[in-house]
Image (cartoon, rainbow, N blue to C red):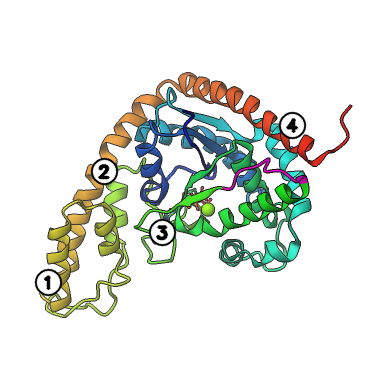
Amino acid sequence: MTKPVILTGDRTTGPLHIGHYAGSLKTRLERQDSHEQFLLLADTQALTDNAHDPDKVRRSVLEVALDYLAVGIDPAKSTICLQSHLPALAELSMLYLNFVTVARLERNPTIKDEIRARGFGRDIPAGFLCYPAAQAADITGFRATVVPVGEDQAPLIEQTNEIVRRINAVAGQSVLPEARAVIPKAGRLPGIDGKAKMSKSGGNAIALSASPDQIAAAVRAMFTDPGHLRVSDPGRVEGNVVFTYLDAFDEDHTGVAALKAQYQRGGLGDEVIKRRLDGVLQALIGPIRARRAELARDPGHVLDVIRQGTEMARARTQDTHRAVVDALGLFRL
Ligand code: ATP
Ligand code: MG
Protein backbone atom coordinates (compact mmCIF):
# COMPACT_ATOMS: atom_id res chain seq x y z
CA MET A 1 0.00 0.00 0.00
CA THR A 2 1.27 3.46 -0.79
CA LYS A 3 1.56 5.82 2.15
CA PRO A 4 -0.37 9.10 2.21
CA VAL A 5 1.79 12.07 1.24
CA ILE A 6 2.58 14.95 3.58
CA LEU A 7 3.85 18.28 2.34
CA THR A 8 5.00 20.94 4.77
CA GLY A 9 7.46 23.72 4.47
CA ASP A 10 9.03 26.67 6.12
CA ARG A 11 9.94 30.01 4.70
CA THR A 12 13.70 30.49 4.78
CA THR A 13 13.54 33.75 6.69
CA GLY A 14 15.57 32.71 9.74
CA PRO A 15 16.13 29.84 12.14
CA LEU A 16 13.04 27.97 13.31
CA HIS A 17 11.52 28.61 16.73
CA ILE A 18 9.59 26.76 19.42
CA GLY A 19 6.33 27.84 17.73
CA HIS A 20 7.34 25.74 14.73
CA TYR A 21 8.14 22.87 17.04
CA ALA A 22 4.75 22.92 18.78
CA GLY A 23 2.80 23.88 15.67
CA SER A 24 4.23 21.62 13.02
CA LEU A 25 7.59 19.92 13.54
CA LYS A 26 6.28 17.60 16.26
CA THR A 27 3.56 16.26 13.95
CA ARG A 28 6.10 15.81 11.18
CA LEU A 29 8.35 13.79 13.49
CA GLU A 30 5.49 11.58 14.61
CA ARG A 31 4.54 10.77 11.02
CA GLN A 32 7.90 10.01 9.47
CA ASP A 33 7.16 6.28 9.28
CA SER A 34 3.46 6.29 8.49
CA HIS A 35 3.62 8.87 5.67
CA GLU A 36 5.70 9.77 2.67
CA GLN A 37 6.89 13.20 3.66
CA PHE A 38 8.29 16.20 1.78
CA LEU A 39 9.70 19.23 3.60
CA LEU A 40 9.99 22.29 1.42
CA LEU A 41 12.61 24.95 2.10
CA ALA A 42 10.39 27.76 0.83
CA ASP A 43 12.93 30.31 -0.36
CA THR A 44 10.80 31.59 -3.24
CA GLN A 45 7.92 32.21 -0.89
CA ALA A 46 10.29 33.91 1.55
CA LEU A 47 11.12 36.40 -1.20
CA THR A 48 7.49 37.52 -1.44
CA ASP A 49 8.03 39.82 1.54
CA ASN A 50 11.82 39.83 1.62
CA ALA A 51 12.74 40.88 -1.92
CA HIS A 52 14.91 43.64 -0.40
CA ASP A 53 17.02 41.05 1.45
CA PRO A 54 17.74 38.00 -0.74
CA ASP A 55 20.91 37.50 1.29
CA LYS A 56 18.89 36.59 4.37
CA VAL A 57 16.71 34.24 2.33
CA ARG A 58 19.79 32.46 0.96
CA ARG A 59 21.59 32.20 4.29
CA SER A 60 18.50 30.83 6.01
CA VAL A 61 18.29 27.80 3.73
CA LEU A 62 21.05 25.99 5.61
CA GLU A 63 19.73 27.27 8.96
CA VAL A 64 16.29 25.76 8.43
CA ALA A 65 17.75 22.52 7.05
CA LEU A 66 19.96 22.28 10.16
CA ASP A 67 16.90 22.80 12.36
CA TYR A 68 15.09 19.96 10.57
CA LEU A 69 17.95 17.54 11.04
CA ALA A 70 18.59 18.68 14.62
CA VAL A 71 15.03 18.01 15.78
CA GLY A 72 15.19 14.53 14.27
CA ILE A 73 13.93 14.72 10.70
CA ASP A 74 15.62 11.73 9.07
CA PRO A 75 16.55 12.26 5.39
CA ALA A 76 16.31 8.50 4.85
CA LYS A 77 12.59 8.79 5.62
CA SER A 78 11.68 12.37 4.73
CA THR A 79 12.64 14.38 1.65
CA ILE A 80 14.06 17.87 2.24
CA CYS A 81 13.94 19.98 -0.94
CA LEU A 82 14.52 23.55 -2.14
CA GLN A 83 11.57 25.40 -3.67
CA SER A 84 13.52 27.68 -6.04
CA HIS A 85 15.06 24.62 -7.68
CA LEU A 86 11.72 23.02 -8.51
CA PRO A 87 10.62 24.80 -11.70
CA ALA A 88 7.46 22.68 -12.02
CA LEU A 89 6.12 24.39 -8.88
CA ALA A 90 6.53 27.80 -10.52
CA GLU A 91 4.82 26.50 -13.66
CA LEU A 92 1.92 25.10 -11.66
CA SER A 93 1.62 28.45 -9.83
CA MET A 94 1.23 30.26 -13.13
CA LEU A 95 -1.54 27.87 -14.16
CA TYR A 96 -3.30 28.14 -10.79
CA LEU A 97 -3.35 31.94 -10.82
CA ASN A 98 -5.98 31.64 -13.54
CA PHE A 99 -8.24 29.69 -11.22
CA VAL A 100 -8.40 32.24 -8.41
CA THR A 101 -9.62 35.83 -8.36
CA VAL A 102 -7.83 38.85 -6.89
CA ALA A 103 -10.88 39.47 -4.68
CA ARG A 104 -10.61 35.95 -3.26
CA LEU A 105 -6.90 36.39 -2.56
CA GLU A 106 -7.60 39.69 -0.80
CA ARG A 107 -10.30 38.06 1.33
CA ASN A 108 -8.05 35.27 2.61
CA PRO A 109 -7.92 35.82 6.42
CA THR A 110 -4.28 34.70 6.69
CA ILE A 111 -3.21 37.08 3.95
CA LYS A 112 -5.25 39.91 5.50
CA ASP A 113 -3.58 39.39 8.89
CA GLU A 114 -0.13 39.14 7.38
CA ILE A 115 -0.59 42.25 5.24
CA ARG A 116 -1.59 44.15 8.38
CA ALA A 117 1.30 42.72 10.42
CA ARG A 118 3.80 43.67 7.74
CA GLY A 119 2.41 47.19 7.35
CA PHE A 120 2.25 46.96 3.55
CA GLY A 121 -0.65 49.41 3.30
CA ARG A 122 -1.49 49.53 -0.39
CA ASP A 123 2.03 48.54 -1.45
CA ILE A 124 1.50 44.80 -1.36
CA PRO A 125 4.02 42.90 -3.47
CA ALA A 126 2.04 41.00 -6.12
CA GLY A 127 4.00 37.87 -5.25
CA PHE A 128 2.85 38.18 -1.66
CA LEU A 129 -0.82 38.56 -2.50
CA CYS A 130 -0.57 35.57 -4.83
CA TYR A 131 1.44 33.25 -2.59
CA PRO A 132 -1.65 31.18 -1.70
CA ALA A 133 -1.72 30.05 -5.35
CA ALA A 134 1.97 29.18 -5.11
CA GLN A 135 1.30 27.29 -1.91
CA ALA A 136 -1.47 25.39 -3.70
CA ALA A 137 1.17 24.46 -6.28
CA ASP A 138 3.51 23.26 -3.52
CA ILE A 139 0.87 21.07 -1.91
CA THR A 140 -0.61 19.62 -5.08
CA GLY A 141 2.75 19.39 -6.87
CA PHE A 142 3.58 16.58 -4.45
CA ARG A 143 0.00 15.26 -4.50
CA ALA A 144 -0.06 15.78 -0.76
CA THR A 145 -3.28 14.99 1.07
CA VAL A 146 -2.06 15.77 4.59
CA VAL A 147 -0.62 19.14 5.58
CA PRO A 148 0.47 19.52 9.22
CA VAL A 149 0.48 23.25 9.82
CA GLY A 150 -0.09 25.85 12.49
CA GLU A 151 -3.62 27.14 12.90
CA ASP A 152 -2.73 30.36 11.04
CA GLN A 153 -2.40 28.38 7.83
CA ALA A 154 -5.83 26.73 7.73
CA PRO A 155 -7.38 29.30 5.32
CA LEU A 156 -4.57 28.60 2.88
CA ILE A 157 -5.43 24.92 2.71
CA GLU A 158 -9.05 25.91 2.14
CA GLN A 159 -7.95 28.10 -0.76
CA THR A 160 -5.80 25.29 -2.17
CA ASN A 161 -8.81 22.99 -2.22
CA GLU A 162 -10.91 25.60 -4.02
CA ILE A 163 -8.30 25.75 -6.76
CA VAL A 164 -8.14 21.95 -6.89
CA ARG A 165 -11.92 21.68 -7.26
CA ARG A 166 -11.97 24.27 -10.04
CA ILE A 167 -9.21 22.57 -11.99
CA ASN A 168 -10.81 19.15 -11.59
CA ALA A 169 -14.14 20.61 -12.77
CA VAL A 170 -12.61 22.18 -15.88
CA ALA A 171 -10.53 19.06 -16.58
CA GLY A 172 -13.60 16.87 -16.12
CA GLN A 173 -11.56 14.42 -14.04
CA SER A 174 -10.00 14.35 -10.64
CA VAL A 175 -6.44 15.07 -11.67
CA LEU A 176 -5.51 16.60 -8.27
CA PRO A 177 -6.39 15.38 -4.77
CA GLU A 178 -7.77 17.66 -2.08
CA ALA A 179 -5.67 18.16 1.04
CA ARG A 180 -6.47 18.19 4.72
CA ALA A 181 -4.79 20.45 7.30
CA VAL A 182 -3.66 18.73 10.49
CA ILE A 183 -3.71 21.39 13.18
CA PRO A 184 -2.33 20.62 16.65
CA LYS A 185 -4.59 21.15 19.67
CA ALA A 186 -2.16 23.70 21.09
CA GLY A 187 -3.11 26.08 18.27
CA ARG A 188 -0.77 28.90 17.47
CA LEU A 189 1.91 29.79 19.94
CA PRO A 190 1.96 33.51 20.87
CA GLY A 191 5.18 35.52 20.87
CA ILE A 192 7.10 36.24 24.10
CA ASP A 193 5.59 39.74 23.89
CA GLY A 194 2.07 38.28 24.12
CA LYS A 195 1.32 39.09 20.46
CA ALA A 196 -0.95 36.64 18.67
CA LYS A 197 1.82 34.70 16.94
CA MET A 198 5.43 33.86 17.56
CA SER A 199 7.11 34.53 14.25
CA LYS A 200 10.60 34.68 12.81
CA SER A 201 9.85 38.11 11.36
CA GLY A 202 8.20 39.42 14.52
CA GLY A 203 11.32 39.53 16.74
CA ASN A 204 9.29 37.75 19.45
CA ALA A 205 10.55 34.20 19.04
CA ILE A 206 12.70 31.72 20.94
CA ALA A 207 14.81 29.89 18.36
CA LEU A 208 15.38 26.15 18.51
CA SER A 209 19.07 27.11 18.35
CA ALA A 210 18.88 29.64 21.22
CA SER A 211 21.73 29.63 23.75
CA PRO A 212 21.00 29.06 27.45
CA ASP A 213 21.42 32.81 28.05
CA GLN A 214 19.09 33.73 25.18
CA ILE A 215 16.44 31.38 26.57
CA ALA A 216 16.83 32.85 30.06
CA ALA A 217 16.62 36.42 28.72
CA ALA A 218 13.50 35.61 26.66
CA VAL A 219 11.79 34.06 29.68
CA ARG A 220 12.73 37.07 31.85
CA ALA A 221 11.25 39.47 29.27
CA MET A 222 8.11 37.39 28.85
CA PHE A 223 4.67 38.98 29.05
CA THR A 224 2.67 37.79 32.09
CA ASP A 225 -0.17 39.67 33.76
CA PRO A 226 0.49 43.41 33.92
CA GLY A 227 -2.02 43.67 36.82
CA HIS A 228 -0.10 41.15 38.94
CA LEU A 229 2.09 43.56 40.89
CA ARG A 230 2.65 41.90 44.27
CA VAL A 231 3.18 38.20 44.85
CA SER A 232 0.08 38.16 47.07
CA ASP A 233 -2.15 39.62 44.29
CA PRO A 234 -4.39 37.24 42.35
CA GLY A 235 -3.03 36.85 38.80
CA ARG A 236 -4.51 36.10 35.40
CA VAL A 237 -3.67 32.89 33.61
CA GLU A 238 -5.46 33.64 30.32
CA GLY A 239 -3.20 35.58 27.97
CA ASN A 240 -0.29 35.00 30.35
CA VAL A 241 2.42 33.79 27.99
CA VAL A 242 4.34 31.88 30.67
CA PHE A 243 1.33 29.65 31.31
CA THR A 244 0.60 29.30 27.59
CA TYR A 245 4.12 27.97 27.09
CA LEU A 246 3.91 25.73 30.15
CA ASP A 247 0.71 24.27 28.67
CA ALA A 248 2.52 23.64 25.38
CA PHE A 249 5.84 22.28 26.65
CA ASP A 250 5.59 21.12 30.30
CA GLU A 251 4.61 17.47 30.37
CA ASP A 252 3.61 17.59 34.04
CA HIS A 253 0.05 18.78 33.37
CA THR A 254 -1.14 18.23 36.95
CA GLY A 255 1.75 20.30 38.27
CA VAL A 256 0.92 23.12 35.85
CA ALA A 257 -2.77 23.00 36.80
CA ALA A 258 -1.84 23.35 40.50
CA LEU A 259 0.42 26.32 39.73
CA LYS A 260 -2.37 27.98 37.76
CA ALA A 261 -4.79 27.61 40.65
CA GLN A 262 -2.28 29.07 43.08
CA TYR A 263 -1.48 31.95 40.72
CA GLN A 264 -5.17 32.81 40.35
CA ARG A 265 -5.67 32.75 44.12
CA GLY A 266 -2.64 34.93 44.75
CA GLY A 267 0.59 34.05 46.49
CA LEU A 268 2.63 32.90 43.50
CA GLY A 269 5.22 35.22 42.00
CA ASP A 270 6.12 35.52 38.33
CA GLU A 271 9.66 34.62 39.27
CA VAL A 272 8.63 31.10 40.31
CA ILE A 273 6.65 30.29 37.17
CA LYS A 274 9.37 31.79 35.00
CA ARG A 275 12.03 29.65 36.68
CA ARG A 276 9.95 26.56 35.96
CA LEU A 277 9.46 27.54 32.31
CA ASP A 278 13.16 28.28 31.93
CA GLY A 279 13.90 24.72 33.10
CA VAL A 280 11.36 23.22 30.68
CA LEU A 281 12.66 25.17 27.69
CA GLN A 282 16.34 24.52 28.51
CA ALA A 283 15.53 20.79 28.60
CA LEU A 284 13.67 20.97 25.28
CA ILE A 285 16.19 23.10 23.38
CA GLY A 286 19.47 21.85 24.94
CA PRO A 287 19.70 18.54 23.02
CA ILE A 288 18.47 20.16 19.76
CA ARG A 289 21.16 22.85 20.07
CA ALA A 290 23.88 20.28 20.73
CA ARG A 291 22.88 18.14 17.74
CA ARG A 292 22.64 21.23 15.56
CA ALA A 293 26.15 22.38 16.52
CA GLU A 294 27.48 18.94 15.62
CA LEU A 295 25.73 18.95 12.21
CA ALA A 296 26.88 22.51 11.49
CA ARG A 297 30.48 21.27 11.52
CA ASP A 298 29.77 19.44 8.26
CA PRO A 299 27.76 21.79 5.99
CA GLY A 300 28.73 19.59 3.00
CA HIS A 301 26.61 16.80 4.41
CA VAL A 302 23.61 19.12 4.87
CA LEU A 303 24.05 20.35 1.28
CA ASP A 304 24.09 16.77 0.01
CA VAL A 305 20.84 16.05 1.83
CA ILE A 306 19.20 19.07 0.18
CA ARG A 307 20.61 18.22 -3.26
CA GLN A 308 19.42 14.63 -3.19
CA GLY A 309 16.01 15.57 -1.82
CA THR A 310 15.56 18.29 -4.44
CA GLU A 311 16.42 15.92 -7.24
CA MET A 312 13.79 13.45 -6.10
CA ALA A 313 11.25 16.22 -5.66
CA ARG A 314 11.98 17.55 -9.14
CA ALA A 315 10.86 14.34 -10.81
CA ARG A 316 7.76 14.14 -8.64
CA THR A 317 6.60 17.72 -9.29
CA GLN A 318 7.32 17.52 -13.03
CA ASP A 319 5.02 14.50 -13.25
CA THR A 320 2.22 16.44 -11.60
CA HIS A 321 2.71 19.46 -13.86
CA ARG A 322 2.56 17.27 -16.93
CA ALA A 323 -0.58 15.53 -15.65
CA VAL A 324 -2.35 18.87 -15.04
CA VAL A 325 -1.40 20.25 -18.46
CA ASP A 326 -2.67 17.04 -20.08
CA ALA A 327 -5.87 16.99 -18.06
CA LEU A 328 -6.63 20.59 -19.00
CA GLY A 329 -6.08 19.60 -22.62
CA LEU A 330 -3.51 22.25 -23.48
CA PHE A 331 -1.62 21.94 -26.75
CA ARG A 332 1.27 19.50 -26.70
CA LEU A 333 4.17 19.57 -29.12
P1 ATP B 1 7.73 34.41 9.01
O1 ATP B 1 7.62 35.39 10.13
O2 ATP B 1 8.91 34.62 8.14
O3 ATP B 1 6.43 34.24 8.25
P2 ATP B 1 7.01 32.19 10.63
O4 ATP B 1 7.61 32.19 11.98
O5 ATP B 1 5.59 32.64 10.47
O6 ATP B 1 7.99 33.01 9.70
P3 ATP B 1 6.65 30.20 8.60
O7 ATP B 1 7.84 29.67 7.88
O8 ATP B 1 5.80 31.22 7.93
O9 ATP B 1 7.16 30.75 10.02
O10 ATP B 1 5.71 28.99 9.08
C1 ATP B 1 6.06 27.63 8.90
C2 ATP B 1 5.08 26.72 9.60
O11 ATP B 1 5.16 26.86 11.03
C3 ATP B 1 3.62 26.96 9.27
O12 ATP B 1 2.99 25.71 9.20
C4 ATP B 1 3.09 27.72 10.43
O13 ATP B 1 1.71 27.51 10.63
C5 ATP B 1 3.90 27.14 11.58
N1 ATP B 1 4.06 28.17 12.62
C6 ATP B 1 4.76 29.32 12.49
N2 ATP B 1 4.67 30.06 13.60
C7 ATP B 1 3.87 29.35 14.47
C8 ATP B 1 3.40 29.58 15.79
N3 ATP B 1 3.71 30.69 16.45
N4 ATP B 1 2.61 28.65 16.38
C9 ATP B 1 2.29 27.51 15.70
N5 ATP B 1 2.70 27.24 14.46
C10 ATP B 1 3.48 28.14 13.83
MG1 MG C 1 4.70 32.93 8.42
Q: Residue at x 65, y 67 (%)?
A: 107
SS type, badge 1: helix
Residue 262 is tagged as 1
| Residue numbers of the magenta segment | 171-178
Q: Is residue 267 left or right of residue 138?
A: left
Q: Residue at x 59, y 38 (%)?
A: 143
N-terminal of the pair, mark 4 or mark 2, is 2
Residue 188: mark in rendering: 3
**Amino acid type, mark 2:** Leu
86, above or below 53, in the image: above
Give the Cα distance between marks 1 and 4. Answer: 61 Å
Mark nearer the N terminus (3 vs 2): 3
Q: Position of residue 307 (x, y in %)?
A: 56, 22
- Asked whether disc 3 touches disc 1, contact meaning CB atoms under 8 Å apart, the reply is no
Q: CA distance from mark 2 to mark 1?
A: 25 Å
- At horizontal 21% and vertical 49% (from top left) the residue drawn is 280
Type of amino acid at the residue the image marks with label 1? Gln
Marks 1 & 4, CB-CB < 8 Å contact: no
Q: Position of residue 315 (x, y in %)?
A: 64, 25
Q: Locate residue 325, reporting x and y percent.
A: 78, 37
Q: Secondary structure at mark 3?
A: loop
Residue that badge 2 annotates: 284
Q: Is residue 177 magenta?
A: yes
Mark 3 Cβ and ligand 1 under 8 Å apart? yes
Which residue is under mark 4?
322
From the image, state whether disc 3 or disc 1 is nearer to you.
Answer: 3
Badge nearest the viewer, 3 or 2: 3
